[in-house]
Image (spheres, grey):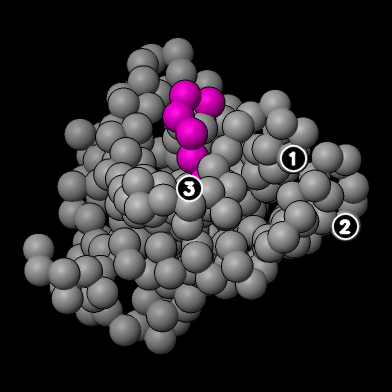
Amino acid sequence: MPLKNFFCTLQFWWFAIAAASYVYLNPLFGGDNYKRAENFEADWMGAILLRNLGLTVVYYEFWHHTLYRMKLADRKFKPSWPTTAVVMRNRFWTCMGAVQWSAWEVMYAHMFATGRLPFMSDDAITASWGNVARFVLWSLFTPIYRQVHFYFIHRLLHIRPLYKYVHSLHHKNTDPEPWSGLCMHPIEHLFYYSCTALPLLFLQHPFHVFYSGQHAMLSPAEAHSGFEDHNGADLMHYIHHAKFE
């Protein structure tokens, strides 16, 4: 894919949202701010929770509003509309997903701040061209790894006991809409956000953990839109929900 086409993809916008929110909406960004995370304090933890909930509500409601109220897409996979009760259920569990990612983020911030988990500092990035390359390569690798991780986790969740008691909540949406993307059982959210565990094995900058988590938090909206004529539509995933295929 030509580089110029990257800027027309959702992958670019997910990266841009993560980068902007990491810099401008991060109570721990810059200087020695990560030291604040040595202690669990309501101010910085609350700011993380409010940011993640706010981004989730704005982003998912944007897709729901443009597709289901403004009707900016024409070709819906199934000529029906989700009920208010279904959308409200999906909103609740999606917001619970944002809450759980906030808890993961707080945990990682605390481990970075206390030295329990080594990380690449801001100064280390510019210390050598090798570190610059490492930072860029991890940034490019994150969305690829996310897809591989999701594939195997999704297959695992279709094992009968896990499906019956956990993943079946997600599959109540046989006619998915944007809010259904992150509508999951808390145990499924736990599996899902394990994609952020790479710094337990490799030295990463905190941004890469943040990017992986935000990518997981926001990206399901489009693939579960219920429409085929927009950027990010996913026919195969619709069939998976509609036919359990």
Circle 1 residue: 113
Residue lying at the far left in this picture: please name it: 1
Instruction: Please tell me the numbered disc located at residue 43.
Output: 2
Furthest-top residue in this view: 161
Point 83% across, 40% down: residue: 38
The amino acid sitting under disc 3 is His
- Tell me where the magenta segment starts and ends, as one range: 200-205
Q: Amino acid at mark 1?
A: Ala
Q: Which residue is mark 3?
A: 208
Tell me residue 87's x, y (percent).
54, 60
Identify the residue at horizontal 36%, vertical 16% (top origin): 159
Q: Could you tell me if residue 93 is visible in this image?
A: no
Task: Name the amino acid type tagged 2.
Answer: Asp
Q: Marks 2 and 3, how far apart in space?
A: 23 Å
Mark 3 vs mark 1, foreground winner is 1
Q: Nearer the viewer, mark 2 or mark 3?
A: 3
Q: For the C terminus, which image quadrant?
A: top left
